[in-house]
Every structure is written in C-alpha cells, then in structure tokens.
Image: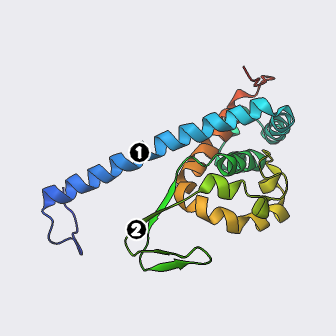
Amino acid sequence: MQFKLGKAKHLSEEELESMLVSNAIQMFTAGYETTSTILAIALFHLAKHPDVQERAWKEVDEVFAELENEEDLDYRAIQKLSYLEAVLQETARTWPVTPVERECVQEYDVPGMGFTVPKGMLVQIPTVALMNDERHFGPNAEKFDPDNFADPERRASRYEQLKLIWCVCTPEIIVATQIIRTTYAGLQTDSVLVPC
C-alpha cells in the first residue's frame, strides 16, 4: 500500500496505515450508535404522535404514486420525503444524542458570572437545555413538532440555534434520514406504529 505522506512525513508507512484504519473504525462505530439512537427516538415519536405518522405515510404514498414501479425508488425519489427529514431534525433537536464539548482556546470572562474560563479547559454545552429553550423555540419548545423544520420560514429561524447540534451530528442525521426514508418508503403498507 502506498501513501502520500504530505505533512505527516514523520510517520512510518505502518504508523500511517494504523492511524487511517483506526480513524475509519472510529468513524464507523461513532456513527453507528448515534444513528441507531436517533432512529429509535424518531420511531418513538412517530408512535406517540399519530398525526405526524399519518402525514409521513401520506408523503410516502404521494412519492410512490409518482413512480411507475417499485424498482424506480431511487435517491431522487427518496429525497422528496422532506417531511421525514423534518421528523429526524426535530428528533435531533428534542433529544440531542451527542454532547458538545470544546476546549477553550483563550481565556474567556463569562458575562455577569464573575468567572473566567481558563485556556485549555474543556467546556460542555448543555444541548438538551439549549434545544428546549423557549427563547429559541417558542412557548412550546418542549413539544415534538416537525413543522419546526417542515415549514421553510420556521426552519430558517431555527437554523442559528441548530448550528451547534448540526456541527456534532450532521453525518448521523444524514444517515438516519436516508435509513428512515428508505425504510418508510420500503414498507409501503398500512402499518401503524403504536406505543407499547
């Protein structure tokens, strides 16, 4: 195996290969847990909110009605399932599955707190509290409402608040969106999810 080392000239070929394999394994395992968690929570929400589930099924039916046959279900058709994407984005908002931690790169005085965050300190941002804050998501912030993302105007106003969570789990949301879109579209039955 040959590698172009670039800036990593101090690594041997074996060390570089080990680093690349380690990173690939980490990306797979990190994405697996968060994707499955987002999917599980989304299915829970669909079971608890029959109106949301009905709207999602209607969207699937409409997309399938446009296809000549089942084999035509491709990436473009799946991309039309925008309400399912909104369900997943709202799922990620109401139950963020990954903490946001950052290392402070310079001293920072927290306004009104009389506290200085020292350089090098690990800071954890409370994403659950932030995503359920009425100042950002209105008086019903704790309510599961995919229209926060299905409605273009509301989606635009939510973008700033969600930059924080998207930077952490965007790959998981993309993967989960594709999985749930494909699964929902593939079911193509009158099945209904119900809470236990």
In this rendering, which labeled residue sits more in front, label 2 or label 1? 2
Who is closer to the viewer here, 194 or 128? 128
Measured as percent of width and height from the top left, residue 162 is found at 66, 62
Check disc 1 and report the residue beneath it. Answer: 28
Which of the labelled discs sits on residue 181, or is there none?
A: none
Q: Residue at x 55, y 62 (%)?
A: 167
Disc 2 vs disc 1: Cβ atoms closer than 8 Å? no
Question: Which quadrant of the rendered structure holds the C terminus?
Answer: top right
Q: Amino acid at mark 2?
A: Met
Measured as percent of width and height from the top left, residue 156 is found at 77, 67
- Whether residue 9 is situated above or below residue 195 in the rendered picture: below
Q: Residue at x 14, y 60 (%)?
A: 13
Tell me if 5 is positioned left or right of 79 in this view.
left
Measured as percent of width and height from the top left, residue 123 is found at 47, 64
Please say which color scheme the image uses: rainbow
Dot 2 or dot 1: first in sequence order is 1
Check disc 2 and report the residue beneath it. Answer: 121
Who is closer to the viewer here, 150 or 102? 102
For label 2, count other residues whose C-alpha is less than 10 Å away and answer few (under 14), some (14-19) or many (20+): few
Question: Which quadrant of the rendered structure holds the N terminus?
Answer: bottom left
Looking at the rendered structure, the secondary structure element under dot 2 is loop
Distance CA(mark 2)–CA(mark 1): 28 Å
Quadrant in the rendering for residue 36: top right
Tell me if 124 is positioned left or right of 51 in this view.
left
- Whether residue 33 is situated above or below residue 16 in the rendered picture: above
Quadrant in the rendering for residue 45: top right
